[in-house]
Image: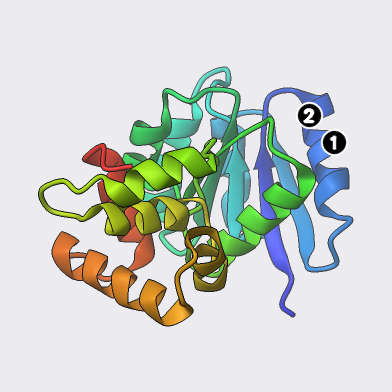
Amino acid sequence: MDTIRIMLVEDHQIVREGLRRMLELSPDMLVVAEAASGEEALGKLVEVSPDIVITDIKMPGMDGIELTRSVKSTYPLCKVLVLTLYEEYLTPAVEAGAAGYLQKDLRRDELISAIRSVRDGRSPIHMSMDSGHLARLVSDSQEGLSGRERAVLSLVARGLTNKDIAEQLSFSETTVKRVIRKVLDKMGVSNRSEAVAQAIRDNLI
């Protein structure tokens, strides 16, 4: 398995060190650089060429939203994963080009899974979603996407695989694939990441 090269951007040193130790317990992950600000991160980016930048939102100087925008405009192949305490910056982060948005209260295994999801082209969004909420989504049909389609899209946003989605909703994997294809067609997008970004902007999930 190819090593995932990661840059950590976080203004609190103790948090950066904890993240580094946590990530490097996984044999497929390597932290190639750390930065305490957006400006410092941009200065190091060309030297280390990370696959993924993991950034906080609120930092001195350039914040995580502006950093995301700058990274994607200058190094479009580099993916940005936001890791923050705040929920309210989800939409601007996605609009700036973030591949995923995670809150800092997630577990280590969830963070590792999210990083691998970003590597594989998915867009994990860490949100609280219980079975009751999913049931309401499945039964709630609105103009545009059906309830079933919105439920599947919500789980896609969490970075789940087709197999995981099928288990959560008691569908077959074939049904999940068919629903995702319909969602992409209805939304006029070409992949799961674009669908998640548009759904967030349109408040569909």
For the point 77% across and 53% down, the residue is 31
For the point 74% across and 71% down, the residue is 3
Residue 169 x/y as whole percent: 47, 60
Residue 58 x/y as whole percent: 54, 21
- Front residue of 42 and 68: 68
- Front residue of 108 and 89: 108
Amino acid found under the numbered disc labelled 1? Gly
Question: Where, by quadrant of the figure, is residue 47 drawn?
Answer: bottom right
Residue at numbered disc 1: 18
Amino acid found under the numbered disc labelled 2? Val
For the point 42% across and 23% down, the residue is 88
Residue at numbered disc 2: 15
Can I make out residue 131 in this image?
Answer: yes
**Is 3 left or right of 46, judged from the image as shown?**
right
**Is 65 left or right of 41, judged from the image as shown?**
left
Look at the image and tell me in which quarter the N terminus lies: bottom right
